[in-house]
Amino acid sequence: MKNKYYGSCLCGKVRFEVEGEFDQFYLCHCEHCRKDTGSAHSANLFSSSACLKWVVGEDKVKTFNLFPTQHVKSFCVDCGSALPNLQMEGKLLVVPAGSLNGDVAMAPNAHIFVSSKADWDNDLENLPKLERLPG
């Protein structure tokens, strides 16, 4: 039996299912992923065999291709949340890990494009860990 994952955007107007297995899980530090997440890196799951099904809101999904690069980002037009997309002429499913509603049983395989890592992205594991916003 294949695994089934459920996901959505922040506002809930887009919901999707992924049926199948993920092949790889990468934390990407390239300048494009940092820019489109507004963070230190993206966290994406990749599959060459899983199937994506839009449950609701497919008309709310916009896909941006950064030409001439291979960088692609799909997002909800209402809340801006990152969403899955198909790349390489539909042969590769890319799913932002944070868009899934539950846990994924696999840990990231690697940090990639670390030569583009933000200069403030060092020793972050040593920062204090707080349960909520300080104040």
Image (cartoon, rainbow, N blue to C red):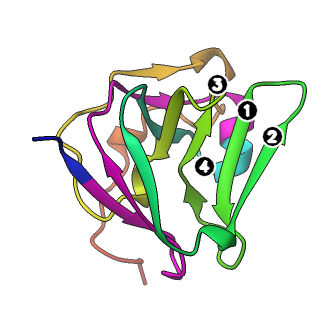
Label 3 CA crowd tier, 10 Å (few <14, some 14–19, many 20+): few
Nearest to the eye among marks 3 and 4: give it: 3
Tell me how far mark 1 sits from mark 3, CA to CA. 11 Å
* Residue type, label 4: Ser
The reply to whether dot 4 and dot 2 touch (C-beta < 8 Å) is no
Q: Which residue is labeled 4 in the image? A: 39
Q: Nearer the viewer, residue 24 or 131?
A: 24
Side (left or right) of 90 relative to 73: left
| Residues in magenta, as a range | 5-33
Q: Position of residue 17 (x, y in %)?
A: 36, 58
Q: Which residue is labeled 1 in the image? A: 71
Q: Which residue is labeled 2 in the image? A: 65
Side (left or right) of 61 relative to 10: right
Q: Which mark is residue 88?
A: 3
Q: Nearer the viewer, residue 68 or 128?
A: 68
Residue at the farthest right position: 68
Tell me how far mark 4 sits from mark 2, CA to CA. 19 Å
Tell me how far mark 2 sits from mark 3, CA to CA. 12 Å
Looking at marks 2 and 3 on the same chain, the residue that comes earlier in the sequence is marked by 2
* Residue type, label 1: His
Looking at marks 4 and 2 on the same chain, the residue that comes earlier in the sequence is marked by 4
Secondary structure at numbered mark 3: loop
Q: Residue at x 90, y 25 (%)?
A: 68
Secondary structure at numbered mark 2: strand
